[in-house]
Amino acid sequence: MDGKKTPLYDVHVAQGGKMVEFGGYCLPVQYETGVIREHMAVRTACGLFDVSHMGEILVEGDGAIAYLNHLLTNDYTVMRPGQARYSPMCRKDGGTVDDLIVYKRRDDSYFVVVNASNKDKDYAWMLAQQTGSVSITDVSDQYAQIALQGPKAESILRRLTDRIPEKYYTAYFDGQVGGISCILSRTGYTGEDGFELYLPPDQAVHMWELLLETGREDGLIPCGLGARDTLRLEASMPLYGHELSDSISPLEAGLASFVRLEKPEFIGRDALLAQSAPDRRRVGLKVTSRGIVREHQEVYLDSQPVGITTSGTHCPFLGGAFAMALIRSDIPSEGAQLEVDVRGRKVAAVTVPLPFYRRPKKS
Amino acid sequence: MTFPKELRYTETHEWVLFAEDGTATIGITDYAQDQLGDLVFVNLPEPGDAVSAGESFADVESVKAVSDVLSPVSGDVEAINEVLADEPERMNQDPYGSWFIKVRDITGQVNLMDADAYQAFVASC
């Protein structure tokens, strides 16, 4: 199989992972447990993911903050060390280069996490936009990444460390988990509470086995890319190449709260200002007749084409078929009766608010 | 993984059972369900529809992807297994009990393997 091996490759194979190529890496799409049980483990207990394919880029220097505010649509002016903030990264025409997370380490040091499949494109783009005194370094090979996700994640982690980031979207750069140094971040891509650990590749196997062993009594199991995708879709999180792309703007994708048009300047601002009421927007679809809607399927209202689906599958926790679509923005985002062309068969769907799934508040 | 002796198998991982009354019962194999992963939907033809050997007559959806199911025989659909619409997980749990369709008036078929040949074929996949 083509694709780079992550430091956990041999462990996945030994644990029964079905390996596939994704974003240039060889990763398990599922283990023998299957996607549905892996998905349910994350919603009800805890799941462990190898996300070492994600790219990490360091932005450093006195000009780092000015650079990030120019490069990204979100505002990084007011941020404490250890805070994380999501942002789209746009082209001049408002299309999206990628979406990413920026962690502030110090006033002059930021840790940027990007999608695996876009890493080389992002790095080239970031270098081309370089301004002032800033250095940009691809440090992806220095990090493995493991995600521990689910309602039991905190209690499992508590047995291995006494310092846990309290708030969602914060991190400790000097984290220690089971005696292993790591960046310990309270973030994730599943819609659950959880953590992402960035650590030296030669510590990844030890950390993976330690977490699995520690969490076994709580129902922690390894999960593959299949569950990662169904979980993010059920939680209605955008995936680059689906809800966002070079030709889909963050405003169309419903990410206006991460586009700070009040900033005086950033790449794509003029185009996005002109598009403040886009012609199409991202909506949620619940399939009401039999069938599964997938990506790139035409959506109809009264037999007229009104848009296209961007992702869709069966959502195991909600127990039904859901999809996201880019459709004409005059169509109500709730209660509109539509049809989707599923390989020549018309499947009924209704627009429903996003997200499909929101985790229950802690009691 | 099991390979019941009384069945015949296709290279595209369907099984077929020929009955004495001239009908053929069709489903997907244990290997197929294992490769597809958790199945969540099947789209079946209607009774009375014609099916053609080697051509798609149904599609099965896993959480990951959709796959065509090819008919081992040509003929007319006599019955469909309605249970699968409500309990698609049966295709994973009991692939040889979860028949998709029964076909009558059979006029042709693709190349079929017996259980031993199919087991060897799967081992080489």
Image (spheres, coloured by chain):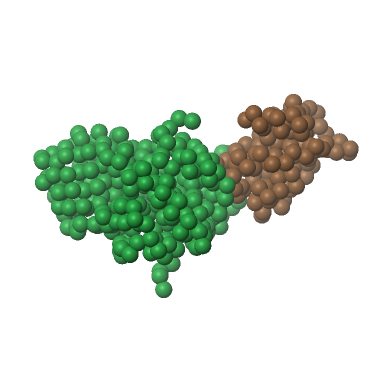
Chain colours: A green, B brown
Q: Is residue A121 left or right of residue A321?
A: left
Residue plotted at (67% across, 32% down) = B122
Q: Residue lying farthest top?
A: B111
Q: Is residue A9 visible?
A: yes
Q: Does A49 appear above or below A119?
A: below
Q: Residue lying farthest front?
A: A179
Q: Is residue A341 visible?
A: no
Q: Residue lying farthest right?
A: B20
Looking at the figure, which quarter contains the C terminus of chain A?
bottom left
Q: Is residue A345 left or right of residue A130?
A: right
Q: Nearer the viewer, residue B51 or A52?
A: A52
Residue plotted at (25% across, 33% down) = A124
Residue plotted at (18% across, 37% down) = A129
Q: How many marks?
A: 0
Q: Nearer the viewer, residue A7 or A24?
A: A7
The location of residue A4, given as percent across then percent down, is 41, 34
The location of residue B15, given as percent across then percent down, is 74, 37
Q: Is residue A121 left or right of residue A12?
A: left
Residue plotted at (26% across, 55% down) = A174
Q: Is residue B43 left or right of residue A36?
A: right
Q: Nearer the viewer, residue A140 or A285?
A: A140
